[in-house]
Image: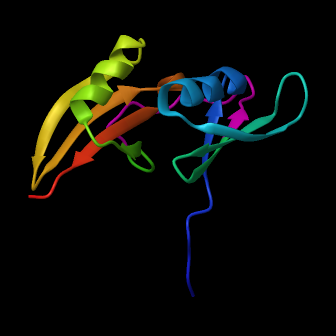
Amino acid sequence: MKFRCDHVHLRSRDAGAAASFYVAMFGARETGRVGGDPVQRVILDLGGLTVFIEQAAAEVHPAASTPCLGVEHIGLAVEDIEAALAELSGRGVKVRVGITDRGAGVRIAFLEGPDGALIEILERRAA
């Protein structure tokens, strides 16, 4: 049996605003919407990954504090982590952890997205 990634599903207090964040900050492309006003789901293409952003009901609990068990963050590759981090922080994206060398040519940083979503940006260079 073979498996492939189909989508990542996020929930947000404001699905439209969350989708706008991923479009503006990471170049995601909106590919669809379900529902009217308010929108029930916004569908994005984020670097080839389908992301569903669902409008959360009032009783949905906030995200767990990280580090946590289960799905903890989404990782986005960049060519130049220093330039990417400067651009994103200049646009007001909250930096949770600055650039860290992880060895073997890997450098990472962590950002905060809508509703507390943790987003890693990483640069991989030939070691």
- Position of the N terminus, as image quadrant, is bottom right
Q: Is residue 102 left or right of residue 41?
A: left
Answer yes or no: is residue 73 visible.
no
Residue for point 35% across, 34% down:
66
Q: Position of residue 99 (x, y in %)?
A: 18, 31
- Position of the C terminus, as image quadrant, is bottom left
Q: Is residue 30 left or right of residue 23?
A: right
Q: Position of residue 82 (x, y in %)?
A: 22, 29
Name the image quarter holding residue 41.
top right
Q: Position of residue 59 (x, y in %)?
A: 71, 26
Residue for point 64% across, 29% down:
19
Name the image quarter holding residue 7.
bottom right
In this rendering, the answer to whether 113 lies above or below 75 is: above
Magenta stretch, main secondary structure class: loop
Question: Which residues, given as a range, are shown in magenta?
Answer: 53-68
The residue positioned farthest toward the bottom in the image shown? 1
Answer yes or no: is residue 28 visible.
yes
In this rendering, the answer to whether 97 lies above or below 7 is: above
Residue for point 71% across, 36% down:
54
| Label tally | 0
Residue 60 part of the magenta segment: yes
Q: Is residue 83 left or right of residue 47?
A: left
Report the front residue among 99 and 38. 99
In this rendering, the answer to whether 32 lies above or below 90 is: below
| Structure colour scheme | rainbow
Residue 79 part of the magenta segment: no
Q: Is residue 39 left or right of residue 115?
A: right
